[in-house]
Each structure stands twice: as structure tokens, then as C-alpha cells.
Amino acid sequence: MNDVELWRELGQQLRVDAIRPAAKAGSGHPTSGMSAADLMAVLLAKYLRYDFADPHDPHNDRLVFSKGHASTLLYAMFRAAGAISEEELLTYRQFDSIFEGHPTPRIPWVDVATGSLGQGLPYAVGMALAGKRLDRLPFRVWTLCGDSEIAEGSQWEALEHAAFYELDNLVAILDVNRLGQRGETMHGWDLDSYANRARAFGCHTIEIDGHDVEAIDRAYAEAIDTAGQPVVIVAKTIKGKGDPDVEDKNGFHGKALDHSEEVIATLGGVRNLEIEVAKPETGASKHEFPSETLELPRYELGAEVATRKATFAEEFRDAIPDRYFEMYIAEQQMVATAVGLQVLGWRPFASTFAAFLSRAYDFIRMSAISGASYCLCGSHAGISIGEDGPSQMALEDIAALRAVHGSTVLHPCDANQTAKLVERMADTEGIVYLRTLRPNTPVIYGPDEDFEIGGSRTVRQGDDVAIVGAGITVHEALKAADALAKEGIEARVIDLYSIKPLDAETLRSLTCPIVTVEDHWAEGGLGEAVLSALGDADDRPPVVRLAVREMPHSGKPAELLAEAGIDADGIAAAARSIARAHAGA
Amino acid sequence: MNDVELWRELGQQLRVDAIRPAAKAGSGHPTSGMSAADLMAVLLAKYLRYDFADPHDPHNDRLVFSKGHASTLLYAMFRAAGAISEEELLTYRQFDSIFEGHPTPRIPWVDVATGSLGQGLPYAVGMALAGKRLDRLPFRVWTLCGDSEIAEGSQWEALEHAAFYELDNLVAILDVNRLGQRGETMHGWDLDSYANRARAFGCHTIEIDGHDVEAIDRAYAEAIDTAGQPVVIVAKTIKGKGDPDVEDKNGFHGKALDHSEEVIATLGGVRNLEIEVAKPETGASKHEFPSETLELPRYELGAEVATRKATFAEEFRDAIPDRYFEMYIAEQQMVATAVGLQVLGWRPFASTFAAFLSRAYDFIRMSAISGASYCLCGSHAGISIGEDGPSQMALEDIAALRAVHGSTVLHPCDANQTAKLVERMADTEGIVYLRTLRPNTPVIYGPDEDFEIGGSRTVRQGDDVAIVGAGITVHEALKAADALAKEGIEARVIDLYSIKPLDAETLRSLTCPIVTVEDHWAEGGLGEAVLSALGDADDRPPVVRLAVREMPHSGKPAELLAEAGIDADGIAAAARSIARAHAGA
């Protein structure tokens, strides 16, 4: 067999193997794999540089199935590469199998979970950026995109950033099979519409027939030769290609073929080609940056410093410009870049206003499935930002980030505590979120005090009532406790800086009534976290939860905290009332 | 004064009035308004058709400040139109003022809250779609965009949909002042880079000098004459235009000018031009669609029907194609379209997989600030979807949607209940979220039973333990109760289909121990909602919360429910244990 014959045969094998697991499982997306089989055949046989025995080799190319639903095609490639057996392939979608409906990094050769469309390409940009600017290794990132998913704005954020950073190590292969889940896409087979857009965004584009293996070969060769620009290959394909009953017909998305035996016969039956995938050149070494001893900023006790100051990205940029990447106003790409960088072993910190992390929530959700580890810094949280108004106030961020699997949620109240927690974050697995404040707050902890994730601090003793806060409300709680002390009510104040995981032991040891107070909506935040730590106890003190309950607006921070009832007066009133009721009971 | 002189003078007035409120407040974004003042002067003086006395007139043009931080310029326009006084203008950012840091619909002439960048244009697309396809009125939607915010992928979703729906009633004015918050944008003053992109996305583009009022006039005239395409005017402007010390200089974003008196003098001082803004033609009437009596689907008791079936968008599309708009795979634009449609008084239902609503979370958050009312249907929730795997499983949606101000969160377990709740949703203010299931579940309610928002149903009586679930877990709870009954444990089962607001009275009346069970992460979902209803009671039974706690994967629904401990066996085990402990206590 010459190359061309091999590619054609391999394409048919991949097609057959994209059909079989779905047929066995009774569900899946075989037709979405059949359209891209020839594209992947040429890639696997000639262009991919990958050591399946050592997926963590930093020299490996990376392959991302942005159209994650075409997973059986990806698994078919693994079989063709000799990485998995036919039996393993056919465990698709079973309870005990790592070959799930959509690919995840439970599979050794998968770097990121896909399946939420429009995410694979943004992650690929992060990986390509790592290759180009951090590892400085000549690996390439290949990503297979569906045409439907190009409607996601995140794809354009990705291409724009790829072009801006001149990521010529990135090749996006666009499988234009015309049909989405519910009929034709916006642009059908108008390849120009995709190519024109990608070109306008700064990419080198190549239009081809995605079933012509020689054209595919030429396109990949051209992609590899392209310097200074990411490459987008726009390939016209046929959904369900190879099955005359289904080819280019609507209504067959996400369905196993019910006549798979017949189709497989039409396609020439099961094949067992095994491709020796080319291994990467391993000559170059991963770039090493000089490392220095970490020196945290130190703040004087009693000074007034905003917690966000201890996390200024600008200072990082000025100190270590080589490792700072501006993502402009594109939060989805910001998070995707972080996810992509951590694939290559980096520990990224991504920062924006806490409110705008909501823009990237689907990426954060998906990255938990990827098992990603990275740090998010959200500043300007809560109504304490004041005059800018509610659009800039994160009031749902704790709820959203707590509900991410394996996440850590931190909310310090003081600049030294913030600095220490930033250090801890860097060594914590999973998605670690740090919430910081705009206004200055007094430094109440010395610069040498250490803060564990999962800990808390009792910053004032008292047994009549316990006030549990974090961030700005710790300071309000301390003022409230001062006021209450004058009335003979001794309030304990707990700084619950680690909201997830939280210090359940300390909370469960409380016997006095509890007031929780947070600059956040009442749902899903610190208050509910405290309730959840106590919920299954037989005897537990009453918990009054103070939180933001009406839509805030512009105003001075103090005015807004008072209006929401989460300032010192509001806390004192709630604590007084419950302490007295309890003392009377 | 001839027109040109008027426009120039008005531009200077708007500039001065964009400076003054920020100077008085000591914060704001005057330089971002100064760049766009001439663009807005010509619009206000000649092109806008708007009755400030009747902002709800459906014939009015709409003006959206997508760059919401330039709010002082917008308020300056209101003053120039005679809608507000100088005194009102100067209340900017004060606690009692509706003229907030970023515009919100608390102001009668503002339709949507902006301030999270990249959202105004998507909303404008929804409004333009309403004008073109529902109201069928010739109003125009003008939107002022910043250049920084064009990096948001949502802008490209917006332009693509605008072009697809041939919204020639939409004019996006792009204020290319080159400088963002942290320095130059990706493209600086490369107007072509913006125009090429917009053209590739199907828009008619016009490049101009944004300080040349005659060029602006010609551009607007051309925009109005353009048929079949949305128009993007790419205007080169100077940030801080008019202040020689600040013009085109970095470091002056989001800062009041500290030498405002001097700048105002340079600009020729305070002016008091009042423009008689042209009123819209009111000849045409809003299109009326024929209305029919609502007939809900009815399902037989005991039938097996997926709750999502009662909300199929396809059926709506087939029945009422004129009022169905396909948003393709672009969830941000889907939600933005809903928000835009409701501005014009429509009640949109937007539907996708529940997991993918996370993609639009920032839009949902912002639309609560807009006071928007619309319905979201999220299908395929939870691990009960089975084989498709975790990327498709919404497990954070309840937490995320509960933490939206004024939201309603519903999670029915049966198709009749779903249909009834859909009817209720249409009449409920605010953002109403309905969570539905992929697998079939038995119909347990008759088709004539009614369900109130904020209600619950006790579907089985019992006093040893109460099991509280919603959706799939109601059915598992019923099976668990059957099993427990055989052991002599009488379990009450509560269907908490309305998770927000929730039936606190029923929950607080419980004296037996409680088991909550949800197909959702443990954070922020039904379990914490139940805890929050009980939290401040002095005596309250212990609550054991069953939820998804480990990352799920592909498998059969039953296997996954069992693994997570939220199937009948898991529920029975938890209920048995707590019921016995309580009986023993």
C-alpha cells in the first residue's frame, strides 16, 4: 500500500471503528465521527508526533477533539495507534470504562475534557501558548472542531488570541459537515464564510475537500510550513460519510446507526491496520526559567490596605513579563488559557473582577471535569465596591465557585492573609478561587502568621453569640462586637476565610447562637456553607444569616453595607436579638 | 447655528457634561465618554427617533450603551434632550440617585443594564429582532460599543446572528479610542481589523473619523439606507478628546479628571443647548399575532414520560414558526436575545441543556440587574442523563440560578407538573428557571392538578422520617419509602418542585428527621435551600443531605444514581439510619 492507499484504508477503518462502539452502546455520535475520519487518518498516519507510551512527554504534539461528541473517532484513532485494544474500544459508555460519551483526561491521551462545544479550541490556544512562550518546544497543537460549534463566541476569542500571540504551532481543523443537532448550521457548506472570518481574525486559512486524502495531506504540509500565524483548515465533509442511507441527511445526529452491520460491510468490514505513530523529536529541552525564593509582601499591622492589592497582576507583569499573558477583555479565553497552560504542567493564576468570572462559568465547570489545577483571583467582590454599581459587584461568585467539583474558595479579610493564601493556592490541587476586596481594610494579622486552607480564625472570644464572616464583614463584625461588649454581650468573631473547604470542627463546637454575615447573595454563600456544616447535628444553635437580599446600586460602601444590613450596626442588631432570645430561652 | 455648528457645539456640551458628574463624584469614566461625544451628538440631534416623555412607546428607537462605563455621556445626552436637569445629572453615583456608575433600567430611558462588557450589542440584537420579526415596526436599535469589548466572543455571536436575521434596523457604533483599562487594545487604531471582521461576519461596515461630525452624519445616513444587513460604524476616536493633558494617554481610564474646571474652560465652558429630539413616526401599529386558548399537553397517570418532553422547543417551532428563533450553538446570544425581546414586552422562553446555561451565566446575572422577565428551560439535568457523561450533566445549575436576584427555580418530577409549571412561568416576573430530565419518569400527578410557584407536594405520608427531593429523586424517594415501610419505618416524601421560592412553612412544620436528596452537587442546591429554610429555628430536626459528591462519568442512569447514593437504596439507607437514631434518642 502506498501512502494514499493507506490513508484511504485507515479512513475507512476509523469510520468503521467510530460506528462500532456506538452501535454496541446503543448511543453516541457515529455520524459526527464519520465526517472527520479521513482528516484524522492523514493526521495520525503522517503528521502527528506523539509517543503513546509516554503521554506526558513535553515534546508530544497535542490533539484536542473540540467536537468532543465525535469521541468514538478519537477512540478509533487510539486503537489504530495500538494504544488500546478492540475490546477496550467496545467498552464505550459503559459504567466501568474510561471511554466515556465525551473524552476526559481519565484517558491517558486526553488532556482536557470536551463536550461543551466551543471549548477545545480555546484550550488548544492555551497549550500552544505554553509551547511557544513557556516550554519553548516545537510541538504542535492540533484541534478538530465542528462547524456547529463555530457559532460560539469563545471560538473567536480563541482565534483572535492565537493570531495575536502568533501561534503558528496551532492547527484548527474545521469539519464542515453542514448538519448540526437540529438541522443545517447557519452557513451550511459555505466554506468561504468560515475562511473569511478566520482570515479576518488573523489566521492562515486553507479550504479543502475533507474526504480527499491528498488534499488533506497538502493542507497539513502547508499548515506546518506556515510561520507567524495560526492555521485554520476548512474542510468540506459529509456527515455520516460512507453510509448511503444516512450521508448528508438530517435527523441522524447523536444516534447510533441501527443498521451498523450493513454499513460496516459497505465500508469494507472491520480492519486492523496499526499505525506506528511518529514519535516527537526529543532533542530540545523544555525551557527553564530562573527561579527565585518567594518573597511575599508584608503589611504593617493596622495599616489600611485593600486585599486585592496583594494580588495585583500588574506587579507580576512588571516583575516577570515573560510569564504574564494579557488576555484582554475575554474571560472565556482567559480561563481556557489557564486550563491549557496547566496541561503542560504550569500553575497559572488568572485574574479579573470577581463578577466577570461568571462569564467563564462553563469553562470553569468543564475544567473540573478535566481535573485541572489553576488559580482564579476575583477582585472587587460584593457591594463594598460602592459607586460603580451592581454590574461590577460579584454577589453570586461564592455560590458559583462552591458548586464546582473539587474547588477551593477563599475569601481573606486582610492583606497579609491574602498574601499567605496566594502562596497556599499555588500548591493546592484543583480550581482554587480567591475573592478579594476593592476598599482598604485594616491589617489585623501579622505578616508571619500562617493560614491553612480549611482553617478559620477566631479573632475575638465571646460566648453569648458567634458572628461568622469573611472579607469585609470580618471588620464589620469586630466593630459590632465592640458595640455589643458595651451592652454586656460577648460576641465571638470567626473569620471563615476558607469557605470551601471549611472548618466544620470549629463551627460544630459552637453552642451559642450564630450570626453569619456575608457580602454576597443569601443563596449558596458563606451562610449556607455554615448551615451545611451543622445540618446533620441533632442539637445545633439557631443560625441567623445576614446577606445581600435586595438589588444594590451605586453609593458609598458604608451606605450600601448599612442598607443591606451587613454593616456593624446590622450585625449588632441581629446578634443582640438572637443572643437575648437565646439567653431568655 | 447651522447643523454642523450645532453638532460640534453639542459634542462639546456632551463632553463637558461627561466630565462634570464624574468630577463631582470623584470617580467615573469621563475619558471614555469624551471619545464618543461627537458620535452621540449627531445621533441625538439628527437621527434618533425617541419620545422621552413616553419611553415605552413601541415606535421609539432604542439606544444601548454597550460600553456602559461611559454612562456620564449617556446622562449628558438625557440632559441635552431636556429629559433631566443639571442637578439630576450631578447626582451621579450618589446613594439616592438613579444615575448610577453604569446605566440600569431604574432610569426610564434605559432598557438594559450594561457594565459587563460585550453585552449591550447582544441585547440590541434581541431588540432589533423583536422590531423586525415580532413587533414589525420600523424602529432602529443604536448601540455604542467600546473597542476593548470587541474582544468578547459574545460580540461576534451578536453580529453573526444579526447578519443571519438580516437586522438592518441595527446600527453598532464602534468607538475605537485605542486605549483600554490597562493600555492599548490588541488592534489599536487599526480600523480595518475591526471592519474586516465585521464584514466577514456579514455586516455592512463604514470607517470614519469619529470626531468629524460631517463624516458621522454621512455614516448614519448610509446606515439608514442599508438594507438587509446590520451596520457597523468603525469610528477612530481619541480617548479623553478635548483635554490636552489626557488625550490619547494611557492611565486615565476610569478616573475623574483632577483638573476638570480647567478642561471645561478649554472646552468652552458649560453649555445649555437643548435638543428637540425627533419623535418616532407612530403611524404603523405593532403587529398582533392571533392568540389561541392555551391547551396544555395531558399525560396519563402511570405513563412514562420525560419531563423535558413537556417543554420541547421543536414542538413550539413547528406550531408557531413565526415566534421561534434558532440561536444555534451560542448560549450567550440565546439569553441576550431573550433579554432583548422582553424589553419590547415579549415573554421569551429560551431552552438548551441545563449544563450549557452556565455559558450564559454573566448574561443571566446582568439581566437580573435589568429587571428582566423571561423563562429558561434547562433539560438533561443531573447524572440521570447517563451515558453522555459529565460534560452534559448540569450539577451546578440550581446553585447558580438560585444565586440570581429575584429568580425562580423549578424542578418538576412529572410531565403534567412540568406542563402546569410552564404555564405558571409565563406569568411570573423575573428570571424563571425550569430544570427538566432526560429519562422517562412515571406520571404521578393527574393532568388537572395545579402547582403553585412556592408550593410543594407531600406525595406520601409518614412521621418517622421525611425525604425531600425534586425531579428524578422524588421517584427514587417513593421507592425508598416503599422499602422502608416493609421494615416498619414510615417515611414522608415531599416533592419540593419549587426550590426558589420554597415552601418554608411545610418544611418548618416537620418534626421528624429529614433526608434531602438531589441530583446536583451538594453545594447551593436543594439540600442547602432546605437548610436555609430551617436555619434560624431554635429546634429543628437533623438534616442529612444526599447529593452528588464525586465526579460522575458515563454509565446507565441507574448505575450512576446508585454510585452517587441518591437512588432508592441510598435514600433508604440514609433514612433508615437517621430514623433509627432519632427513634433511639
Image (spheres, coloured by chain):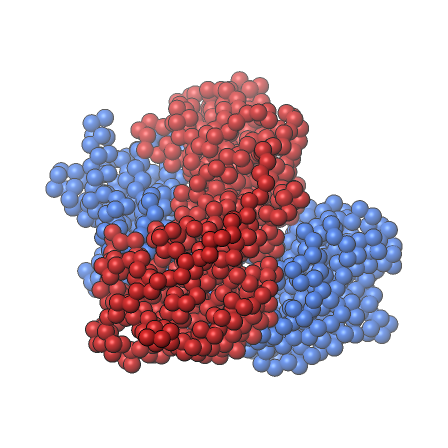
Chain colours: A red, B blue
Residue A78 is drawn in which quadrant?
A: bottom left
Q: Residue at point 54% right, 37% down?
A: A422
Left or right of B417, for residue A36? right
Rendered-image quadrant of the N terminus of chain A: bottom left
- Of residues A259 and A506, the one nearer the viewer is A259
Q: Position of residue B262 (x, y in %)?
A: 86, 51
- Of residues B299 and A118, the one nearer the viewer is A118
Left or right of B149, for residue B552? left
Residue B84 is drawn in which quadrant?
A: bottom right
Q: Position of residue A69 (x, y in %)?
A: 36, 63
**Residue A366 in view:** yes
Left or right of A358, for residue A211? left
- Of residues B203 and B517, the one nearer the viewer is B203
Is B432 placed above or below A482 here?
below
- Of residues A509 and A48, the one nearer the viewer is A48
Q: Position of residue B100 (x, y in %)?
A: 66, 51
How many numbered marks are there?
Answer: 0
**Residue A183 in view:** no
